[in-house]
Image: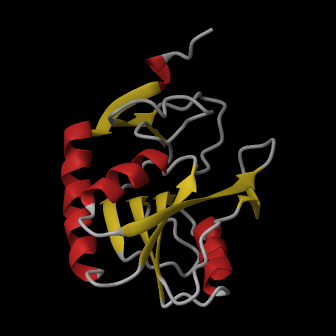
Amino acid sequence: MGASRGELARVLFTGERIQDRVRQIGAEITRDYSGRDLVVIGVLKGAAAFTVDLARAIDLPLAMDWAAVSTYGRGSTAGTPRLLKDVGEDLAGRDVLVVEDILDTGTTLSWLMDRFREQAPASLHCCVLLRKPHAVAKPVEPRYVGFDITEHWVAGYGIDYAERHRNLGDIHEVRLPAAAPAASA
């Protein structure tokens, strides 16, 4: 049985606007990392579409890898991060850029950055598609930000709501059921 798109509210960012911003960030990264040994690490699953599009917009040789982290159990509240898939690339002495879909409280991204920092990269920065500046509780300062948002739940362009809507080209605000908690994704 298919999921209803009725749970999706207004479009926050069109696919065209997203792609324009991805190209801008790609140009910034190209400038900033010229002549360096860049490793781009996408955080699965939410940042998959963004990571691939961003890598295509970077006009440099680079390595790509993936990490997967879970902070959600059976409920909808965040818990302790746990690594589901680690990177295979050796990060020592290399310039590492971690690409994430949403910077919310910063718990997951901060934890992941600390893990990568232990591998002694030459530099370690992050790029986030969406940032909720009002919600950040951990010290994470992304070097590149696609868009700032205030909405609690979003879906589309790789980002899911209950494992649905990753395939949409636009990013939508999600209309929460009346009984749903007001926590962030």
User: Where is 43 relative to 138, above or below?
Assistant: above
| Side (left or right) of 31 relative to 94 | left
Residue at (44% x, 61% y) in the render: 132
- 22 lies above or below 175: below
Q: Residue furthest front?
A: 61
Front residue of 82/135: it is 82
The N terminus, quarter of image: top right
Query: Residue 169 in the image: x percent, y percent?
Result: 34, 33
Tally of numbered discs = 0
Front residue of 63 and 148 = 63
Q: Foreground: 73 or 183?
A: 73
Viewed as shown, does residue 11 lie left or right of 41? left
Asked which colour scheme the image uses, the reply is secondary structure
Please tell me in which quadrant of the rendered image residue 134 appears: bottom left
Tell me the quarter of the picture where residue 81 sits: bottom right
Q: Does residue 133 appear anywhere in the picture?
A: no
* Direction right: furthest residue: 74
Q: Is residue 85 left or right of residue 133?
A: right
Residue at (72% x, 51% y) in the render:
77
Residue displayed at 37% across by 55% down: 149
List x then y, in percent, for residue 130: 40, 57
Residue 43 against residue 118 in the figure, above or below = above
Q: Is residue 10 above or below residue 124?
A: above
Residue at the (42%, 45%) spot, across then down: 49
Q: Whole-percent x and y of residue 37?
A: 40, 81
- Spot occupied by residue 99 in the image (x, y as percentages of width and height): 46, 63
Residue 4 in sight in this render: yes
- With 171 as the anchor, is 58 left or right in this view? left
